[in-house]
Amino acid sequence: MIKRSLLLSLLLAAGGLHAQDQAAPDLAKAKQTAETICAGCHGADGNSLAPTFPKLAGQHADYVAKQLRNFKAAGDKPAERANPIMGGMVAALDENDMKALGLYFASQTQKPDASKSPELAKLGQNIWRAGIPAKNVPACAGCHGPAGAGVPALFPRIGGQYADYTEAQLKAFRDGGRKNDPALMMQTIALKLTDPEMKAVADYAAGLH
């Protein structure tokens, strides 16, 4: 009986160690994936060269992994975040691959963008810091922080991101093209913003470091 219990304990322990090995992020593989598959759009280090593609360098690991997960369809269930290009890119990735890519990009240093218009940046600063009380729009800083650093696992880093990309995402939330925000927070906010207000917030955020 004792031998049987000991054997069972050893088998369970071995299974636990195997599960831990399976769960360990393979950062070397993630680096290779980033430098080959991801590099064409996002840059090998996560600093994309085109404003249509987001900078991933310095982004929170959990947020990157969540977005990758949301791009992937699961069986008959469509992807939460519909994008034909990204859907194809993540099709072969498993959960550990996504976590590892998140950790890899989080460890890279972002090369921040810059505000392009003083006038837009001034309006954007007001919205970022104080929101728009008349329209019940909360301050962006409330979730994304004064410098746009965000909160790990909750809110993404927006500071230094391309203004064009940030503006495009705000419009996607407003128009229903993107629906993977927690509790519909961004969809609700974006519905209250005009195009000029979105552009202003995006321009200001681009200059935050």
Image (spheres, helix red, strand yellow):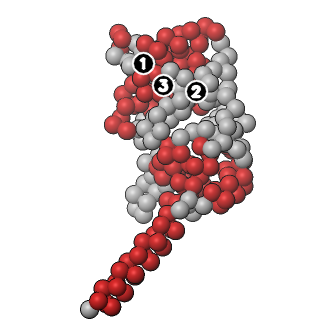
Q: Secondary structure at mark 1?
A: loop
> In this view of the protein, which residue sits in the foreground, 95 or 24?
24
Residue at the (30%, 85%) spot, across then down: 5
In space, the residues marked 3 and 2 are separated at their CA atoms by 9 Å
Tag 3 residue? 145
Q: Nearer the viewer, mark 1 or mark 3?
A: 3
From this view, report whether residue 167 is shown above or below residue 48.
above
Distance from label 2 to label 1 (Cα)?
Answer: 14 Å
Q: Which residue is mark 1?
A: 139
Circle 3 Cα neighbour tier, 10 Å, few/some/many (<14 / 14–19 / ≥20): some
Location of residue 137 (image quadrant): top left
Q: Residue 12: x and y, percent?
A: 38, 77
Per the image, label 3 sits on a secondary structure element best described as loop
Q: Earlier in the sequence, mark 2 or mark 1?
A: 1
Q: Which amino acid type corresponds to the residue marked 2 in the rendered image?
A: Gly
- The reply to whether residue 84 is in sight is no
**Alpha carbon separation for disc pair 1 and 3:** 9 Å
